[in-house]
Image (spheres, rainbow, N blue to C red):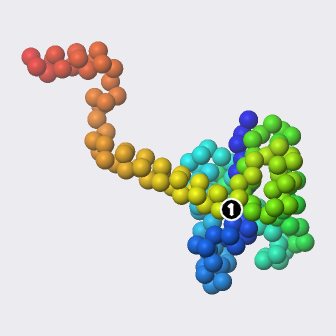
Amino acid sequence: MREWLIVDGYNVINSWTDFAKLRKDNLEHARDLLREKILEYAVFKGYSGLLVFDAQEVQGSAEEENYGAVTVIYTDEGETADSWIERKTYELNKNGDKVFVVTSDYAEQINILGSGAYRISAREFKEEYKRAKKQIEEKVHATASGTGRNELGGRLHEHVRAHFEKLRRR
């Protein structure tokens, strides 16, 4: 069973104040920044991520871009991210996968819950992302502030280490 994180991209961009000015100045940069945050979170949590943008802001046919643990989806012109997410959520749940959907759209949340997935509002996800980011930083700091060295002794069994210590003291 895989665990999926599906994010309604424009819903999050329009909900987080971090993106307010950035969205007005450079929407593409806002999408890229959100993608990086989702990628970092998905990798840390072990999720497969789908970041979905609908054709409201980008004209053209459907497109997918793969970034390792996260695939960015641009829906077909005229198809909403909501309908794409609802269809994909149903499909993944039918396969027995666990699905978390990030959106603050109430109607979409009702459909998501009805299909057996878990919903996370954009505001809740922002707080969850901050907690995960802090855990990542703590993990990196703990690793870096350890011995900082890659010593063989730390990887040997106790009896082997004791034998080497006896030899060293001779």
In front of the other: 8 or 68: 8
Can residue 82 be seen here? The reply is yes
Q: How many marks?
A: 1
Residue at the image position 18 percent from the left and 20 percent from the top: 165
Q: Secondary structure at mark 1?
A: helix
Q: How dense is the environment of label 1, judged by Cα within 10 Å: few (below 14), some, or many (20 and up)? A: many
Q: Name the residue carrying label 1.
A: 122
Amino acid type at image mark 1:
Ala
Residue at the image position 26 percent from the left and 20 percent from the top: 161
The vertical placement of 113 against 10, above or below, is above
> Which image quarter is the C terminus in?
top left
* Residue that protrudes farthest toward the right in the picture: 78
Using residue 17 as the reference point, say whether residue 112 is left or right of it. Answer: right
In front of the other: 104 or 59: 104
> Which image quarter is the N terminus in?
top right
The vertical placement of 78 against 143, above or below, is below
**Quadrant in the picture for residue 160:** top left
Can residue 72 be seen here? The reply is no
Q: Position of residue 41 (x, y in %)?
A: 59, 53
* Residue that protrudes farthest toward the left in the picture: 170
Q: Position of residue 37 (x, y in %)?
A: 59, 61
Q: Position of residue 80 (x, y in %)?
A: 86, 67
**Quadrant in the picture for residue 25:** bottom right
Residue at the image position 78 percent from the left and 77 percent from the top: 57
The vertical placement of 145 against 156, above or below, is below
Using residue 80 as the reference point, say whether residue 19 is left or right of it. Answer: left
Residue at the image position 75 percent from the left and 52 percent from the top: 119
* Residue that protrudes farthest toward the bottom in the picture: 25
Q: Position of residue 34 (x, y in %)?
A: 63, 66
